[in-house]
Amino acid sequence: MVYQECGSSCPKKCSAPSATCADQTCVDGCFCPDGTVLHNGQCFVPDQCPCTHDGKDYQQGEMIPHECNTCKCHNRNWMCNETECPAICSSFGDSHYTTFDGKHYDLLGNCDYVLAKSLDENRYPFEIITENVPCGSNREVCTKAIQFNVGTPGTSNFYHLSLIRGRPIEVDSRSPFEVKSVGNFVYVTIPGGVTLQWDRGTQIYVQLTAEHKGKVEGLCGNFNGNTRDDFKGRQGGPPLIKVTDFGNEWKVHDYCQPPIEYIDTCLKNAGQKAWAKQKCDILSNKVFEPCHSLVDYHTFHDKCMLDACACDIKGECEGICTTVAAYAHECAVKGTPIDWRSSGFCRKFKVCNYSFVTQKNPFLKKLFFLFISTLGIVHISFH
Ligand SMILES: [Ca+2]
């Protein structure tokens, strides 16, 4: 910078390099040399000004990942390639769902439900059905059974896979299912870009590649990029207003009762609210701070409170751990694993030497990275 006795009272900045100054009075002080502009106390040729993202500066040519794309800083602007990205639908706890398009909702129902189903024009017809399996004395659901169907029913080109906690997964060698166990998670992949991930409990993630866009239906929504039209019924038409009506559309058996409105368990069990808040505040405190700008925690905090208030026994409430694990999973997917489990909080998985699974296969390494991140174990070195 150079000293001037009479410099502009509003010097040009990277954020507005060609702005004109209405104030004609001059001031003395340190100014950027002619042809350069100011940014955070430094002078830049306007073309070389850094790009900013999430409050950080990036120099010309620097690249950052954005979902499945890469963005490069070029002349102060981000230039991103625009590959259509896969989407993930999640279901966790006994009632929490996020659609492919990112709509969050809660639904309580004891039935089999169509989580995701391809429409007829899909090249790879598939259907994923889940069933809540209660095991608590309250309404707590401890696991989900999953039925994964591929092909056309009634033909020789039809395959079925059952995923039930505690039972071995039997895969027909002629079927298109590729099943991998990585730590506590099971991954089932079929050709055509469909991957199911299950923690053998209540966490289910369905990932679809962009070729399925607009070609699916069910509780995971229609994957058309519009969050507001996800509550479509089986007949199509305008989206349904009430979540219970939407859920009722996708139950598999007519004899099941309709799903019920999700009640605010913290109103019902008001005495439990303070304890629940103490537990769930892990999501809003500094443990998860690195993830707050990447994944909004408020929705997960709300779900955690509902689950915690519903717990009939204080202590290792599975619903709390599952919800926090689900948030940690989202953070890991965004590239920010969080070491969140502690001796007094949801520490029910052992930390083992996992390096063996990562040695051979980069795909497994990636899956495993997500797995340990979800568990909150990050101090693992890959070999
Ligand atoms: Ca949609």
Image: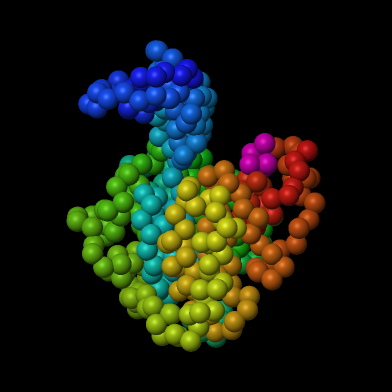
The C terminus sits in image quarter: top right
Residue at 45% from the left image edge and 85% from the top image edge = 269
Q: Is residue 281 visible?
A: yes
Q: For residue 365: magenta?
A: yes
Of the pair 356 and 151, the residue shown nearer to us: 356
Residue at 46% from the left image edge and 19% from the top image edge = 3
- Against 185, residue 176 (above or below) is above
| Stretch of the chain drawn in magenta | 362-366
Name, please, the residue furthest toward the left.
238
Residue at 69% from the left image edge and 71% from the top image edge = 344
How far from the left and from the top, in percent, is residue 24? 24, 23
How far from the left and from the top, in percent, is residue 117? 39, 53
Q: Main secondary structure of the magenta part?
A: helix
Q: Is residue 173 visible?
A: no
- Against 179, residue 56 (above or below) is above
How far from the left and from the top, in percent, is residue 377? 69, 54
